[in-house]
Amino acid sequence: MRKTILMLAVLAFSAWALAASDVLVLGTIDRITELSFENSYDHFTWHILRHTTKALVGMEPGTNKIIPSIAQSWEISDDGLVYTFHIRPGVVFWDGTPCNAQAVKWALERTIRLNGPEGGVFLIADVIKSIEVVDELTVKITLNYPDATFLIRMTDNVIPSLIYAGAPENEFAQGRYVGTGPYRIVEYVPDERVVLEAVPTYFGPAPKTKRIVWVIYANEAALRAAVEAGDVDIAFRTFNPVDIVDLQKNPNLQVVRGPSVSIRYLLFNVTQPPVDNPLVRQAIAYAVDRDAICERVFSGLNSPIYTMVPEGLPPAGSAIPVFPKRDLQKARELLRQAGYSETKPLEVNLWYTPTHYGTTEADVAAVLKQSIEETGLAKVNIQSLEWAAYVKRMSQGGFDMFLLGWYPDYLEASNFLAPWTTESPESLGTFFNRHPRYPVYKELMTKALTTIDEAERAKIYQEIQRMSAEDVPWIPLWANYQQAYLVAQKNVKGIVLDLTMEPHLDLLYKE
Amino acid sequence: MSGVTRYILQRLALTVPMVFILVSVVFLVLRVMPGDPVLAMLGGRNVSPELIAQKRHEMGLDKPLHIQYVEYIGGLIRGDLGRSTRTGKPVGEELISRLPATLELAIWGMLFAALFGIPTGILAAVRADKPTDHVIRVLHIGSFALPIFWVGLMFQVIFAVKLGWLPVASRLSGRFAFSFQRITGFYLLDAMILGDKEVLVDVVKHLVLPGVTLGLAQMGFLGRVTRAAMLEVLDAEYVTTARSKGLAERLVILRHALRNALIPIITVFGLQFAMLMGGAVLTETVFSWPGIAGFLIQSLYYRDWWALQGTIAFIGVFVTTVNLVVDLLYSVIDPRVRY
């Protein structure tokens, strides 16, 4: 009798353990804004959307190699204007509807037509001229102009490229859709949790964990405590730097650092005195102390960068470190050349926003001020504005020197060069469109985007980077690895962090 | 029409201009504050000025201020609080989905405050200026003088991280997300309806730390008020009479003194409860409690004007209603009060 009870207890425990390990709980402080392909543009919303449905092409986990997804193959016309995609047979949406050429056309056209102002639809809308159904499983996309980045824009990294069905014809989706991805959303409670369940009809490899729950925490301290207490299996985005250093010492946890394409930098409004003088901007580029920021503010977790383009982004070899290492002597020479002296120092403002980039921003500003003032020929006035007021003043040209951050719209070098120079110089506060060399940048960028050959394109990007070190519209400061740290319990396996700075949910599992 | 009905109607009629003034002030203050909802949403991104202009047009921000105001008030009268620019959903819907979380926490917090604040307040008054009174007074002042976020963090470190007895934050453990079902939004009630013991225990565990943290600050204040109100009535002649009639001290205090001291206590209790609608910001933040206060803060960061206006109007109506209920309770507590 006692034996039977013991066996029953063991059985019950195993059943419970099995059931419990079937659910993987992740914690974050990120939030969903709106579950709409055509009207959302933030990291966490995009993460959820891309795990619930797929695009024509994808990216190999952990790399930037383009791989087949809904399309099993494709051809590009010689003039680079027509892309013919062959859809994988048998792909279905969660409700069993086949995902065919008509469905692809409907989804892409709907997204482009609805083009929500808060979405990133322009990333595909500007380039696509027409979408045609050739046959049941073949779809032809014609472009307005040859675009070397088009396939990258059609991956599931760019949410407007996702293929879905069942969304309202003329309203934003707001979670109303059926997808083709490995998971479907079972429940979304705003600011509280997102519950995902594996879809048996998914065309790719079956997810390792059937049930995923993202618990949304309100702040970094709660996220850290949750993973320490074992309330979550994984905690991801975003920790305080000191917390990561502490958690690395915790023997019960594993801390994984993924790649980072998030960068931080200083910008100049090139029309605003005194930074309208290129000598001043160059001098500041020599004076900034990236190592001090990385060590003193970020406990060595972030790495200094000397160009805007992150390592490893396509096309290969694009990134070259063009900005100088710290050289106070050179900085002083340039400032003297610009007419400044000990008695008549350069007076410049340094603007930052106190919470949008985490609570470390004030410290960053203090270190920057100190490093520039170390020349003995400059006085930096630190100024701050809360985010909403910050961006307003920035787009009105109200800053001379200011801090900003970038997370890419799509994974290609151009997205780290064009926005502040040729695409949106005014809304991003540089007003570089009024710089004398603006037409040269514009011409080079146009040439790059129509150059299909990757090596050739990389050379053009290198040239733009070299020019930027002379004109200094920006000063690249550090790669933001702080957001690429994932902390997990020891029994969590299959952690693959992508260039999009997120884990592949379908590969995660608990032992 | 009975006196009570007339009184209620009068009070409700007064609510209308009050909410109107409140909403008008908020409307104006938001537009005077630096920052712009469109740029807060799109700024820092690679967007064209045309897109910004288009969005401003869609949100009606390109219209003159007085037209925007009239349109907003018009919507409000029809019960339309506008659409949140951050989440894209109607503000009313957002508030209704978050209200149960806030109410549940407020109820637990106030329950804790009442259970510990009122008896200790009575005890302090009865033992006025004796060691017990001194100890209780220190506890009361200490409990509302301690910063809530610090207390919350300490509780998390001790009871969740170090001892592992209770969860750190949130309302439900992730592992129960599949066995739980949101029915009313009041998780305790939902867990009872579902009848799953494990889920029920989990929900209760999640309520303990935020409930106690929130209740602590309220407890101190309530205790202070109770003590003061009791001291006043303990000197009254009817208490001396009760004692001289030979009534047990317990009965003198509870039936004769406390009942007469209840009016200020209930008033403070009601006000505290109502204020928790938007005032539990720190507790909701520390414990990642997805309620109205958290929504208010997020909306502020994003200059989500419609969400801010709607939430404040909602809180205004709620506070007024609670006040009305408190006023009506006076007649129950004190038969001399008649409407």
Image: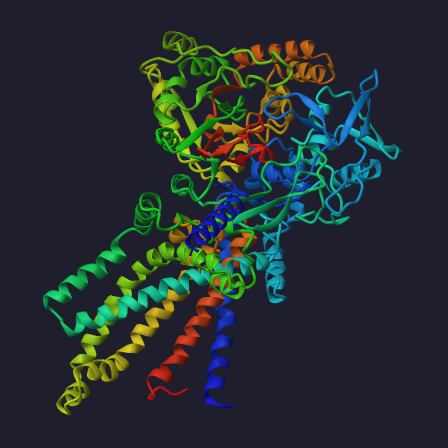
Q: Quadrant of the C terminus of chain B?
A: bottom left
Whole-percent x, y for residue B269 in the image: 34, 69
Residue at the far front: name it: A1
Q: Going by the image, does A446 lie left or right of B84? A: right
Q: Check the image and tell me how it is coloured.
A: rainbow
For image coordinates 38% across by 28% down, the residue present is A248
Residue B221 visible in the snapshot = yes
Residue at the far bottom: name it: B245
Residue A402 visible in the snapshot = no
In the foreground, B85 or A236:
A236
Whole-percent x, y for residue A163 in the image: 74, 37
Number of numbered tags placed on the structure image:
0
Query: Which quarter of the figure has residue A245?
Result: top left
Q: Going by the image, does B242 lie left or right of A406? A: left
For image coordinates 40% across by 7% down, the residue present is A330
In the foreground, B246 or B86:
B246
Whole-percent x, y for residue B68 in the image: 61, 55
In the foreground, A277 or B18:
B18
Residue at the far left: name it: B130
In the picture shown, does residue B30 fall above or below A301? below
In the picture shown, does residue B227 fall above or below A437? below
Q: Going by the image, does B136 lie left or right of A303? A: left
In the foreground, B273 or A388:
B273
In the picture shown, does residue A19 fall above or below B197? above
For image coordinates 39% across by 22% down, the residue present is A294
Whole-percent x, y for residue A37 in the image: 68, 40
